[in-house]
Image (cartoon, grey):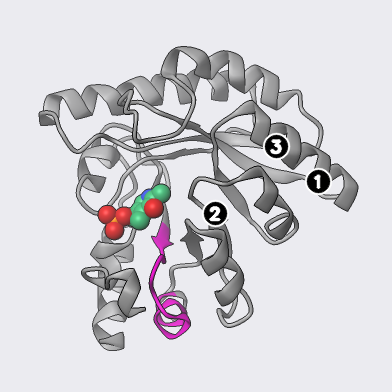
């Protein structure tokens, strides 16, 4: 099992060496929900330096058991749990509302740290997903860029499951245009995080430069009850 995970990780890493459609370097983040510290350590040992949890409880439980790696947070975050992540999170990819930015800013300033963040955009206008509406994203970027304790490094989005390849490609291109607009005036902008196990090739072909992969690395997820 562990061997297979290490092989998957190494093969993906080799494949990503080519970069995205613009020849930019691609950062691969292993999405580690439901995975054991042993499995996560195998991925890090195979050369994937970035790992991301989407639940605060799992982030905390595994924090000291995972060795090294840049620790990302990629899930919906309740404001009352911000305190558990401040000072421990390399990149908070799921900044999805002003209320969260406000609480994060307060906590970061108190702790004397600056938190790198991505703004999450609900690019498919899905009710089940969080994030700023695409139409609001530019204004939100301006506000959060001006917020103390936070450093905006780019944008994160999830493609909807439904839709044709052409429709999905258009959504990635829309996000890439937003990313480029910000990058043109802000040297801190570095990442467009789009691409999961089912759609990462399409996302790379249209300008994403950070992927978040779970199943493609670890295999099918266990049910949380068995965990
Ligand atoms: C689980 C998860 C992923 C990875 O999903 P896979 O389909 O298993 O690759 C990516 N992003 C977020 C926010 C996730 O929670």
**Of 145 and 227, the residue lying toward us:** 227
Can residue 26 be seen at all in this image of the molecule?
no
Whichever of labels 1 and 2 marks the residue nearer the N terminus, that label is 2
Name the residue: 50% across, 67% down.
49
Which one is in front in this view, the residue at disc 3 or the one at disc 2?
2
Q: Residues within 10 Å of mark 1 (few under 14, many from 20)?
A: many
- Magenta stretch: give its range: 29-43
Establish if 155 lies above or below 27: above
Whichever of labels 3 and 2 marks the residue nearer the N terminus, that label is 2
In the picture of the structure, the residue carrying the numbered disc 1 is 107
User: Are the residues flagged by discs 3 and 2 in contact, CB closer than 8 Å?
Assistant: no
Establish if 128 lies above or below 57: above
Residue 5 figure quarter: bottom left
In the picture of the structure, the residue carrying the numbered disc 2 is 73
**Of 216 and 160, the residue lying toward us:** 160
Ligand 1 appears in which quadrant?
bottom left
Which one is in front in this view, the residue at disc 3 or the one at disc 1?
1
In the picture of the structure, the residue carrying the numbered disc 3 is 151
In three-dimensional space, the C-alpha distance between marks 3 and 1, rounded to whole angstroms, equals 14 Å
Residue 213, horizontal then vertical, whole percent: 33, 57
């Amino acid at each position: 099992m562990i061997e297979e995970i290490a092989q998957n990780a190494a093969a993906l890493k080799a494949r990503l060496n080519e970069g995205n459609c613009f020849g930019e370097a691609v950062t691969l983040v292993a999405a580690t929900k439901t995975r054991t510290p042993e499995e996560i350590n195998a991925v890090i040992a195979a050369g994937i330096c970035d790992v991301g949890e989407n639940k605060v409880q799992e982030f905390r439980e595994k924090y000291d058991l995972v060795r090294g790696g840049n620790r990302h947070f990629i899930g919906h975050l309740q404001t009352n749990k911000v305190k558990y992540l401040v000072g421990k999170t390399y990149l908070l990819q799921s900044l999805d509302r002003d209320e969260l930015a406000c609480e994060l800013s307060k906590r970061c300033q108190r702790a004397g740290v600056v938190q790198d963040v991505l703004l999450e955009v609900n690019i498919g206008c899905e009710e089940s997903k969080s994030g700023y509406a695409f139409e609001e994203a530019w204004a939100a970027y301006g506000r959060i860029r001006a917020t103390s304790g936070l450093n905006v490094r780019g944008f994160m989005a999830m493609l909807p499951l439904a839709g044709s390849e052409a429709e999905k490609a258009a959504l990635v291109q829309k996000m890439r245009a937003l990313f480029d607009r910000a990058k043109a005036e802000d040297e801190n902008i570095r990442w467009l995080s789009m691409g999961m196990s089912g759609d990462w090739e399409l996302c790379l072909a249209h300008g994403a430069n950070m992927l978040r992969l779970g199943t493609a690395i670890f295999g099918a997820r266990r049910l949380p009850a068995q965990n």
